[in-house]
Image: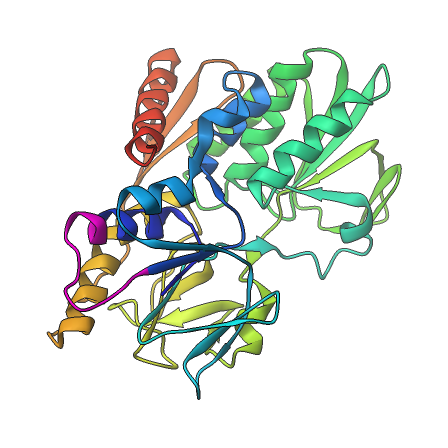
Amino acid sequence: MLVGGGHTHLQVVEAFGKRPLAGWSVILVSAERVAFYSGMAPGVVAGHYRPGELEVDLERLCAAHGIGFRCRRAVGIDRSTRRVELEDGSFVSYDLLSLDVGSVPSLATIDGATEYGLPVKPIGDFLERLDGALRVRPVRTRIVVVGGGPAGVEIALALRQQLSALADLSLVAAGTILEDHPAGLRRYFRRLFDRRHIDLVENAPVDAVRPASVFLEDGREIASDLTLLATGATAPAWLAESALELIDGFVEVHPTLQTSSDPDIFAAGDCATVFGATTPKAGVFAVRAGPALAANLRAKAQGRPLVPWSPQTRYLAILATGPKHAVAVRGGLFVAGRWVWFWKDWIDRNWVRRFRF
């Protein structure tokens, strides 16, 4: 059983559709009928894509590959009976289980975040709620983006592209922006924020979110009509309640992508962390894990040895900057230009097209 329609499981569905596993049936259980490709979300905010362009219809994908599909939210795992509990109270039995349920914003440390903030995940919900909020915005909107990682940076720049001069924009980061990237790239984006008139507040953890303000731990207050939360993430809470071993809130897995808790339960994508690896949560790792997960699920089902997989230590990241312009970074080097955006656009569209039927 596959639980969750993340980037990794899309490839597992494809792999088992092309090479069915004799004697086994495969089912995908997902809370949504549609999977959203997160890499194109800033482009939707900026106005370069329609929301439908980043969608993968999971039910149609599964039907095309001869995979079962059930649209229900998983809420628990009973390992003693080898069943997954669904939100409607029903259960689905499994022999092998794989989890790719993504992550959710970690909001526990920010008072009022749930009541007054708009999390950037899940993507589909975020885009719909953001569109609704912007439709009823004041003539001049004050928007604060909380979070200095790639998601926060890209969303802030995309909003500037969409709203032009009709918004006062701020980005607040608990540390420095883009902490996992080279110092030169951070300087590049600081200059870019200055040119785009986005106020950048670094090394300023947020204490509370209120209907019209964001309060920082140092006592400062920033006026905000709309507060977007691109904060650190954690795995959905029900995974912890399923008695799986966690690392900083994420499901702990071995390099084979088997959980440390149970060799018959696998996990990948943002909800999982490979023991000993120190890689950020990014779609590039979920994409690379897909073939390894499919191969090891097949090997486990057939009683063959599993092959370890480790996240790449050097990887390519492409960050959109608002207009049809982007920055590509790998290791300590980065390049920027319109051609980088069109390269990213080609990669992203081909990824989505691969899973559309």
Range shown magenta = 15-26
Relative to 244, residue 72 above or below: above
Q: Position of residue 75 (x, y in %)?
A: 57, 68
Left or right position of 115 against 24: right
63 to the left or right of 153:
left
Q: Main secondary structure of the magenta part?
A: loop
Comparing 102 with 19, the one in front is: 19
- Which residue occupies 30% across, 61% down? 26
Does the image show residue 125?
yes
- Expressed as whole percent of the image width and height from the top left, the position of residue 256 reads 24, 68
Q: Residue at x 58, y 45 (%)?
A: 122
- The residue shown at (41%, 38%) is 182
Query: Who is closer to the viewer here, 7 or 90?
Result: 90
Is 94 situated above or below 277?
below
* Relative to 328, 152 lies left or right: right
Report x, y in % for residue 284.
34, 43
Residue 222 colored magenta?
no
Where is the N terminus found, in terms of image quarters?
Answer: bottom left
Q: Nearer the viewer, residue 314 or 56?
A: 56
